[in-house]
Amino acid sequence: MTNGDRSAHRLWRAPAWAWVVLMLLFAINLGSAFIPLGNGNVILNLFVAAVMVVVLAIFLMDLQNAQTLVRVVAVAGLFWVVLMFSLVFSDYLSRS
């Protein structure tokens, strides 16, 4: 391998692993749809979705190598999304 081939191989290694992990998590989600776990299905699917978000944020958004300001903005965006979802769900649950 030449030096250019090695750098191209290193460039695609993290996204390829992220894709493999996302496909495995997708298979877990798909498999859980056919297994009756009751409320466990919701808990499992939300956990898998959270892991997918973490994989996307760390590897595909490259937050592991980002500057501090970019990380702070990403965490602030996550905070606001959680806040909005909690307000929407509290409104939904408070209605009869």
Image (spheres, helix red, strand yellow):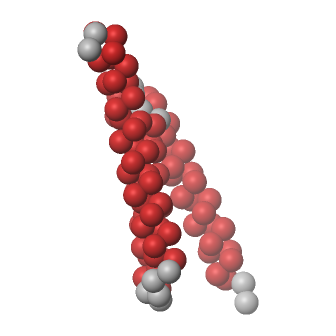
What residue is rendered at 73% in x and 90% in y? 96
Can you see residue 9? yes
What residue is rendered at 42% in x and 67% in y? 28
Give 22 or 55, whichever is nearer the viewer.
Answer: 22
Residue 23: x and y in percent read 44, 54
What residue is rendered at 62% in x and 72% in y? 89
Outermost residue toward the top in this view: 3
Give the vertical position of 94 relative to 58 (above or below): below
Residue 11: x and y in percent read 37, 24
Instruction: Count every numbered label the image shows and give the total.
Output: 0
Residue 59: x and y in percent read 40, 38
- Side (left or right) of 1 relative to 58: left
What residue is rendered at 50% in x and 69% in y? 30
Give 46 or 34, whichever is nearer the viewer.
Answer: 34
Residue 83 quadrant: bottom right
Give the vertical position of 87 relative to 56 (above or below): below
The quarter of the picture where the N terminus appears is top left
Outermost residue toward the right in this view: 96
- Side (left or right) of 91 relative to 77: right
Can you see residue 68? no
Residue 48: x and y in percent read 43, 63
Give the vertical position of 32 relative to 49 (above or below): below
Give the vertical position of 41 relative to 50 (above or below): below
Residue 77 quadrant: top right
